[in-house]
Image (tube, grey):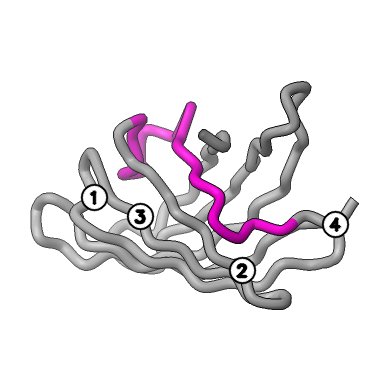
Amino acid sequence: MKINYNNRIFKPVSSSANGEVTNETHFLYKQTKNIITATYKGGLIEIGQLLGKVDECGNIEMCYHQINNKGELMTGKCSSRPEILENGKLRLLETWEWTSGDYSRGTSILEEC
């Protein structure tokens, strides 16, 4: 099944302690062909954007940048793997790495609202 992310909204259900997303962060995804973009905000994040590519299985490779509520510009990269939930909505299993700040790594799980 080919996944189209266009106009889907996601929110985190879990994230590593070194991340900045919280359950108050919401992501609005857009997709054109195999290009993914998203804007996100909420919780510790004033505004963020991501840009990536999706493969034929729905896996996403992306880069992101955001300004947190301390006014810091943070950047990173992320790989997301989709799962389809029983209710037909999507769950994204993410592994990410900061490319600024402490350069640490983490994981997050996002679910479609």
What SS does tag 2 mark?
A: strand
Marks 4/2: CA–CA distance? 13 Å
- On screen, residue 5 above or below 100: above
* Residue under label 1: 45
Callout 2: 10 Å neighbours few (<14), some, many (20+)? some
What SS does tag 4 mark?
A: loop
SS majority, magenta: loop
Task: Please provide percent x and percent y for residue 43.
Answer: 23, 39
Tag 3 near tag 1, CB within 8 Å: yes
- Residue depth check, mark 4 versus mark 1: number of the one nearer the observer: 4
Looking at marks 4 and 2 on the same chain, the residue that comes earlier in the sequence is marked by 4
- On screen, residue 39 above or below 22: below
What SS does tag 1 mark?
A: strand
Identify the residue at image location x=54%, y=56%: 7
Where residue 31 is drawn, which disc sits there? Answer: 2
Q: Is residue 3 visible?
A: yes
User: Is 19 a magenta residue?
Assistant: yes
* Residue under label 3: 40
Rendering quarter of residue 110: top right
Looking at marks 3 and 1 on the same chain, the residue that comes earlier in the sequence is marked by 3
- Residue 23 left/right relative to 80: left
Q: 50 or 108, which is in the foreground? A: 50
Looking at marks 4 and 3 on the same chain, the residue that comes earlier in the sequence is marked by 4
- Residue 61 left/right relative to 21: right
Where residue 2 is drawn, which disc sits there? Answer: 4
